[in-house]
Each structure stands twice: as C-alpha cells, then as structure tokens.
C-alpha cells in the first residue's frame, strides 16, 4: 500500500453535498422561524421557502439515490464491525491524547466504519422519517376529514420535528469533526476539488495510471 492523491469525490457527489447542505440550512432556518424562534421572514414566506427547499431536497435525494445504485457507490456506506472499536476509541479519547487516526482511507472504502454507520442511519432512518412526515403534513388537506385527523397530525408533527433536531445534531457533529485531526482546510478541500490522500494497492495504482490518469496525482 502507498499513499497517493486520488480523486474520490465526483462532480456530482460534490454538487450533491453542497446543494444538500444549503437546502438543509434553509430548511432549519425557516423551520425555526415557523416555530417562532426568530422573525426573519413572515409566516407565509417561511412556509413558502420551507416547502420549496423541501421539494428541491427531495428531488436531490431521488437523484442521489439513483446515482448511488447505478454507480454502485452505495458500497462505501455499508457499515462494518471491523475497525469500529478503534475508530470509536479514537474519537472518544485518543484524539485528545494526540494519537494517530486508526483508519486509513482506501480507494474502495471512502468512509471509516463510524462514518459509514452514521451516513447509513442518516439515509435510511432520518431522511425518510423527515420527508415522509413532511409530505404527510403538507398534504394534510387530503386526509383531514378522517376520524381523529388532528390528533394524528400532532403525531406527524412530532416525528418531523424530532427528525429535524436529529439532523441538526448531525450537522453540529459533522462541523465539529471538521475541526479535529487535520486542519479545517484539509478536511473541506476534498469536497471542493474531489482529491484526497488515499492508500492504494499496486493494482489500484496501476489501474488508475493506465485507465484514469487524470484521477491520480
């Protein structure tokens, strides 16, 4: 294995990441406005912005899911027990003792076990919870005449808000992690340029230099 600068994030992945980030921020800000935490927008404007950003994010997720399966990139997000304890131990206290990160990024595995678990839970639990509850809430007019609809709506709203706070927590942790280990710039730049330091096997290096020379430096 040898370390090389390799393009591991495609243009679509980088667009997906930054567009998703922007839309989630808009949703969080307008969502807090709808609950009276600030008065940056009128209630009507907050509803319009929140709904528009939510629908755009839903379309982005649909394209992202299609891309993950057609390119087989979903393999990077499959959690694994192997190495999980080492990464968990590192972030629990090893990082504060100046220890080296136990995981080395590989060409076939972009995310460490803890990252893969967090992203998988985000994609299969939190995201579906928030967009399903949001759509049910949005189309309340279509089912408001059923018995106890108002009570059901309260439950839907609770799920939506709980999922939103869980995503907000993920955002805070994600930003915090950018300040650990390497410099903030080193963490962010791979999602700007697409290139990161990766351990390559001789076979992987030979493949890239022959078939994708623009993806290795």
Image (cartoon, rainbow, N blue to C red):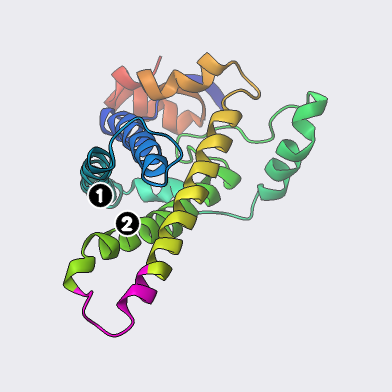
Question: x, y percentage for residue 82?
Answer: 64, 52
Residue at the spot of label 1 = 58
Relative to 138, 30 lies left or right: right
Question: x, y percentage for residue 118?
Answer: 53, 48
| Quarter of the picture holding the N terminus | top right
Above or below 141: residue 15: above
The magenta stretch is: 143-153
In 3D space, how far apart are the residues under numbered discs 2 and 1 (Cα atoms)? Answer: 7 Å
Q: Residue furthest left?
A: 142
Residue 151 within the segment the image draws in magenta: yes
Residue neighbourhood size for the residue with mark 2, other residues' Cα within 10 Å, grouped as few (<14), some (14–19), many (≥20) = some
Residue neighbourhood size for the residue with mark 1, other residues' Cα within 10 Å, grouped as few (<14), some (14–19), many (≥20) = some
Above or below 97: residue 121: below
Question: x, y percentage for residue 210?
Answer: 31, 24
Q: Residue at x 41, y 14 (%)?
A: 217
Q: Which mark is residue 131?
A: 2
Front-lying residue, 82 or 113? 113
Front-lying residue, 25 or 39? 39
Q: Residue at x 30, y 35 (%)?
A: 16
Residue 17 within the segment the image draws in magenta: no
Residues at discs 2 and 1 in contact (Cβ within 8 Å):
yes
* Disc nearer the start of the sequence (2/1): 1
| Local SS, label 2 | helix
Where residue 182 sits, quadrant-wise, is top right
Q: Residue at x 57, y 41 (%)?
A: 112
| Local SS, label 1 | helix
Front-lying residue, 204 or 117? 117
Front-lying residue, 95 or 129? 129
């Amino acid at each position: 294995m040898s370390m090389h600068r390799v393009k591991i994030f495609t243009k679509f992945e980088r667009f997906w990441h930054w567009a998703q980030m922007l839309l989630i921020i808009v949703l969080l800000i307008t969502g807090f406005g709808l609950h009276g935490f600030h008065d940056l927008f009128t209630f009507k404007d907050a509803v319009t912005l929140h709904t528009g950003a939510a629908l755009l994010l839903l379309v982005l997720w649909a394209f992202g899911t299609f891309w993950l399966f057609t390119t087989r990139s979903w393999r990077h997000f499959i959690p694994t027990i192997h190495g999980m304890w080492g990464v968990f131990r590192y972030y629990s206290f090893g990082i504060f003792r100046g220890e080296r990160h136990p995981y080395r990024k590989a060409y076939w595995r972009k995310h460490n076990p803890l990252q893969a678990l967090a992203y998988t839970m985000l994609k299969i639990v939190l995201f579906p919870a928030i967009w399903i509850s949001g759509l049910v809430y949005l189309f309340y007019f279509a089912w408001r005449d059923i018995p106890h609809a108002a009570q059901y709506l309260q439950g839907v709203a609770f799920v939506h808000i709980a999922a939103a706070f869980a995503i907000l927590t993920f955002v805070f942790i994600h930003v915090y992690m950018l300040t650990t280990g390497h410099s903030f710039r080193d963490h962010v730049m791979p999602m700007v340029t697409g290139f990161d330091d990766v351990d390559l096997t001789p076979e992987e290096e030979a493949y890239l230099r022959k078939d994708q020379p623009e993806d290795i430096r």
